[in-house]
Amino acid sequence: MSVGDYANSFLESAKKNWQELDLKKWAQDIGGSSSEAVQAAVYFGLSLAIGYLFKKYFKFIFVCLLVSAFIIKAMEFGELLTINWDAIKTMVGLSSSSDFNSTLNLFFAWIRKNLLLFIASVVGFLVGYKLG
C-alpha cells in the first residue's frame, strides 16, 4: 500500500468516526452530560495554553511579578500607596475575616465539587508544559 493510499484510507476512517461520534451518548455512558464534557474540554484547552505559555515565558513572568511585588511593597512601606486588603478579599470572593486555612478549605471543597474540571485542568496544564 502506498503512502497516498494509506493517507486517504486514514482520512476516510477519521471522517467516518467523526460523523458517527455521538457526544451525548458518550457522555451519558460515562455518567455526565454533554455540557460537562464541553466545559471540561474548555478547561483542558485553556490549561493547555497556560501550561505552554508558562514554560515558554516563566523566567520573564516570574521576574516581572517579583519586581512588581517589590515595588508595591516598597511604596506601601513608604506610605506612598495604601492597599485596602479587606476590599481586595471581598473582590476576590473571600470574607474579610478569612485566613489561609479557610481559603484552603474552600479550594479543596471546590475541587471535590468539580473533580472532572480539576482533572481536565491539571492534565491540560501538564500536557501544555510538556509541549512548551
Image (cartoon, rainbow, N blue to C red):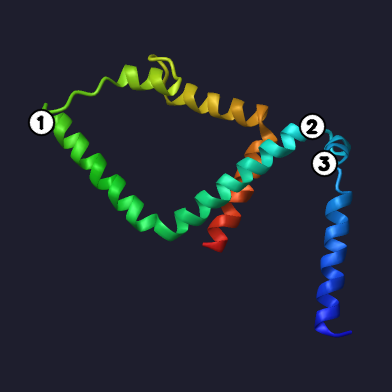
* Residue beneath the point at 53% across and 57% down: 129
Q: Position of residue 85 (x, y in %)?
A: 30, 21
- From the viewer's side, name the closer residue of 87 and 35: 35
Q: Choose mark 1 or mark 2, whichever is in front.
A: 2
Q: Position of residue 17 (x, y in %)?
A: 87, 56
Q: Residues within 10 Å of mark 2 (few under 14, many from 20)?
A: some
Tag 3 secondary structure: helix
| Quadrant housing the N terminus | bottom right
Determine the residue positioned at 56% across, 46% down. Answer: 47
Q: CA distance from mark 1 to mark 2?
A: 54 Å
Which residue carries the number 3 mark?
Answer: 23
Instruction: Please name whichever residue, 19 or 39, is drawn nearer the observer in this view of the structure.
Output: 19
- Indicate which disc, 3 or 2, sits on the residue closer to the N terminus: 3
List the residue tagged with mark 1.
Answer: 78
Q: Which residue is mark 2?
A: 33
Quarter of image, res 36: top right
Q: From what the image shows, is residue 43 above or below residue 12? A: above
- Give the Cα separation between the discs numbered 3 and 1: 58 Å
Seen at 33% across and 17% down, the residue is 87
